[in-house]
């Protein structure tokens, strides 16, 4: 799986960071930064949860 | 059905729907969610709206760009008499705009409330909480926790973040309290809005002359660099942050303390392991979902929600409260259960307008609950629970006062 972000949609709510700060962060503008683009193992579940929780639908998962 | 008012002419249920019990959701919401999850209701001015009660549908409404939040539009539903007229006394709040106008106002401030920035504020939040507890301990018992603690903590914090003086804050709180009362009439709401506008305009002017290290000063500097200071816009931004940031948090503090004092098994859980407090906070947010009036939208085009066709020009109310009690998403939703993972609740809304200050609110509540029960292990209600006065007539649910002793 590969995590993709959309900065046009991102509203900087930080809900992905709150879900898993190892995978996500916010940049100086408050917008999402993906720290682990290809999460594996337990991180996969956290990535799916973050995608679901994101209020702006700014995250998506591309299955390789 | 108890507490449900049906309009005689249209035979439709009247909205807003008042709570009668602090714990149980009014049965009419459940009846709607189970029978007709997108159903027409009648508003106080006789207008009609579609009430949406399922979690999935509420998220669909709140993230659909064809459903407008723009209260300047003529056909926008009036759920609170005078609210739209009162809002017109201010430069538009970001919450009443659609993208791209909304994003233009939100983007410059989102970094102020990022997870990282809020985490950096935690020591100061702790100091504020400890300071008000120190003061409270000097008072004769019992005290009204709402007045001496629950309201002042978030009020001081949000004033500091904005860079506004805490002196004179009582005046602001008096005005805000009337504004948030459901029973305030149209003219009353407009009069209060004019006073709030004047109060905020003055504070913005003072900040332009005396900048500091705070949110408002940074916005002023940013706007100066971009070519001009939008004074009315800044007054609205500050007013929005103040209004959204003090009473809501106070209500959640009161409801959380009330819950843990009346259900000691819940308190025992976070006392035994404070690492469980963040989960408890999200569960309290889900369970109470304090904005009782829901999220209002106006259809700009025909839209299908939950299999129901909503025509262009029709009004929609998404009930985040009903969504957060949806058994399809939360097992035993009527149970307040601190072991539940409730993070995906919609108490802070969903979509582009989701609460800007939600990370701050979460940390405030975590620090408050951990500190209050650690420092006051004998904290208890000073009156029987049945005598407590809940805000069933307000726009945001909570408690009018919370007499406690220790």
Image: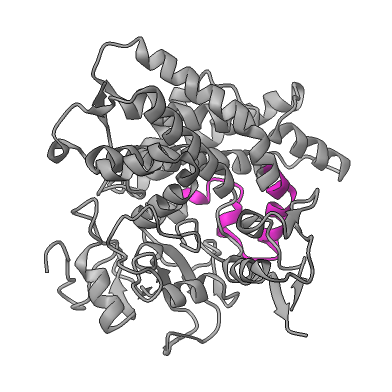
Which residues, given as a range, are shown in magenta? Answer: B86-112
Residue B32 horizontal side relative to residue A42, left or right: left
The percent coordinates of residue B197 (x first, y second) are: 54, 37
Q: How many marks?
A: 0
**A41 lies above or below B342:** below
**B151 lies above or below B344:** above
* Quadrant into which the C terminus of chain B falls: top left
Within the magenta stretch, is there residue B217?
no
State the residue at coordinates (45%, 65%): B296
In the foreground, B192 or B13? B13
Residue B157 horizontal side relative to residue A5, left or right: left
* Quadrant into which the N terminus of chain B falls: bottom left
Q: Main secondary structure of the magenta part?
A: helix
**B138 lies above or below B249:** above
State the residue at coordinates (69%, 56%): A12
In the foreground, B306 or B200? B306
The percent coordinates of residue B67 (x first, y second) are: 54, 74
Q: What's the image's color scheme?
A: one colour
The percent coordinates of residue B290 (x first, y second) are: 37, 52
Which picture quadrant has residue B51?
Answer: bottom left
Whether residue B82 is visible to the viewer of this picture, yes or no, is no
The percent coordinates of residue B117 (x first, y second) are: 69, 40
In the foreground, B145 or B85? B145
State the residue at coordinates (42%, 85%): B306
State the residue at coordinates (53%, 51%): B88
Which picture quadrant has residue B14?
Answer: bottom left
Whether residue B67 is visible to the viewer of this picture, yes or no, is yes
């Amino acid at each position: 799986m590969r995590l993709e972000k959309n900065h046009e949609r991102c509203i900087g709510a930080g809900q992905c960071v709150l879900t898993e700060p190892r995978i996500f962060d916010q940049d100086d503008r408050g917008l999402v930064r993906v720290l682990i683009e290809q999460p594996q193992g337990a991180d996969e579940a956290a990535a799916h949860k973050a995608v679901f929780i994101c209020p702006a639908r700014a995250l998506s998962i591309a299955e390789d | 059905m108890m507490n449900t008012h049906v309009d005689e002419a249209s035979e439709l249920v009247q909205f807003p729907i008042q709570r009668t019990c602090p714990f149980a959701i009014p049965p009419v919401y459940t009846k709607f969610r189970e029978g007709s999850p997108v159903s027409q209701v009648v508003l106080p001015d006789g207008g009609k709206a579609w009430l949406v009660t399922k979690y999935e549908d509420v998220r669909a409404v709140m993230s659909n760009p064809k459903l407008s939040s723009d209260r300047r539009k003529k056909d926008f539903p009036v759920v609170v008499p005078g609210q739209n007229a009162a809002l017109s006394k201010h430069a538009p709040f970001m919450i009443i705009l659609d993208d791209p106008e909304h994003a233009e106002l939100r983007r410059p401030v989102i970094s102020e409330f990022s997870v990282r920035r809020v985490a950096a504020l935690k020591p100061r939040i702790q100091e504020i909480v400890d300071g008000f507890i120190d003061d409270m301990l000097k008072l004769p018992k019992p005290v009204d926790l709402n007045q001496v603690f629950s309201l002042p903590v978030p009020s001081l914090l949000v004033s500091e973040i904005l860079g506004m003086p805490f002196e004179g804050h009582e005046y602001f709180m008096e005005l805000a309290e009337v504004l948030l009362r459901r029973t305030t009439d149209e003219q009353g709401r407009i009069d209060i809005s004019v006073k709030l506008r004047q109060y905020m305009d003055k504070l913005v002017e003072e900040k332009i002359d005396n900048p500091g290290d705070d949110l408002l000063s940074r916005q002023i500097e940013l706007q100066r660099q971009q070519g001009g200071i939008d004074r009315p816009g800044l007054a609205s931004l500050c007013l929005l942050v103040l209004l959204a940031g003090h009473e809501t948090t106070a209500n959640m503090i009161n409801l959380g303390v009330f819950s843990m004092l009346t259900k000691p098994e819940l308190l025992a859980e976070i006392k035994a392991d404070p690492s469980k407090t963040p989960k408890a906070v999200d569960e309290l947010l889900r369970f109470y979902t304090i904005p009782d009036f829901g999220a209002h939208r106006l259809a700009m085009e025909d839209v299908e929600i939950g299999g129901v066709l909503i025509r262009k020009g029709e009004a929609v109310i998404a009930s985040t409260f009903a969504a957060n009690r949806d058994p399809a998403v939360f097992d035993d939703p009527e149970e307040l259960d601190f072991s539940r993972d409730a993070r995906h609740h919609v108490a802070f809304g969903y979509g582009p307008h989701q609460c800007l200050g939600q990370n701050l609110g979460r940390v405030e509540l975590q620090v408050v609950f951990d500190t209050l029960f650690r420092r006051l292990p004998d904290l208890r209600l000073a009156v029987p629970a049945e005598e407590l006065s809940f805000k069933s007539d307000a726009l945001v649910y909570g408690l009018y006062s919370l007499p406690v002793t220790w």
